[in-house]
Image: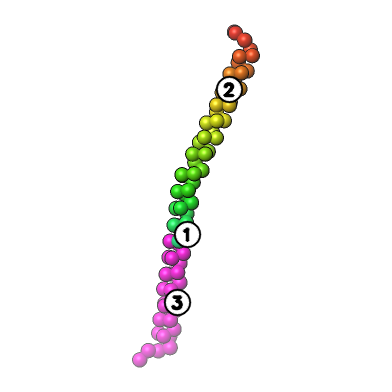
Amino acid sequence: MVGPLTHKIRNLEGQRDQYMQEARKDIQSRRAMHNSQLQSYEQDIKPLKRKARMESIQQNLASIGARVGKMGPM
């Protein structure tokens, strides 16, 4: 014979298990989305940032060279 408290405990445990299962699915889907965003960043955005950084360095070096050239021989 099952008492009312035992029945209530089992019911709550079932709800907890269902909630935990849904939470795991949510975490897995968020992790997959995050991984795909990271992969996209690595493939698309990172090379563009590197290219922009290199262009900026080249422009800075060119402007430094131009200023040094205007100063004339030392």
Under circle 1, the secondary element is helix
N-terminal-most mark, 2 or 1: 1
> Which quarter of the picture shows residue 69?
top right
> Which quarter of the picture shows residue 3?
bottom left
- Tell me if mark 1 has few (under 14), some (14-19) or many (20+) residues whose alpha carbon lies within 10 angstroms of its own: few
Using the image as rendered, state which of residue 20 and residue 35 is in the foreground: 35
Magenta stretch contains residue 27:
yes
Under circle 3, the secondary element is helix
| Amino acid under disc 3 | Gln
| Residue 71 point in image, percent of width and height | 63, 12
Give the spatial CA distance, label 2 vs label 1: 46 Å
N-terminal-most mark, 2 or 3: 3
Name the residue that disc number 3 marks. 15
Name the residue that disc number 1 marks. 30
Instruction: Find the magenta span and give its range.
Output: 1-28
Q: Is residue 64 left or right of residue 50?
A: right
- Tell me if mark 3 has few (under 14), some (14-19) or many (20+) residues whose alpha carbon lies within 10 angstroms of its own: few
Using the image as rendered, state which of residue 61 and residue 22 is in the foreground: 61
| Residue 9 point in image, percent of width and height | 42, 81
Q: Nearer the viewer, mark 1 or mark 3?
A: 1
Q: Nearer the viewer, mark 2 or mark 1?
A: 2
Magenta stretch contains residue 70:
no
Above or below — where is 26 with respect to 8? above
**Quadrant for the C terminus in the image:** top right
| Residue 52 point in image, percent of width and height | 55, 35
Give the spatial CA distance, label 1 vs label 3: 22 Å
| Amino acid under disc 1 | Arg
Q: Which mark is residue 62?
A: 2
Above or below — where is 28 with respect to 36? below
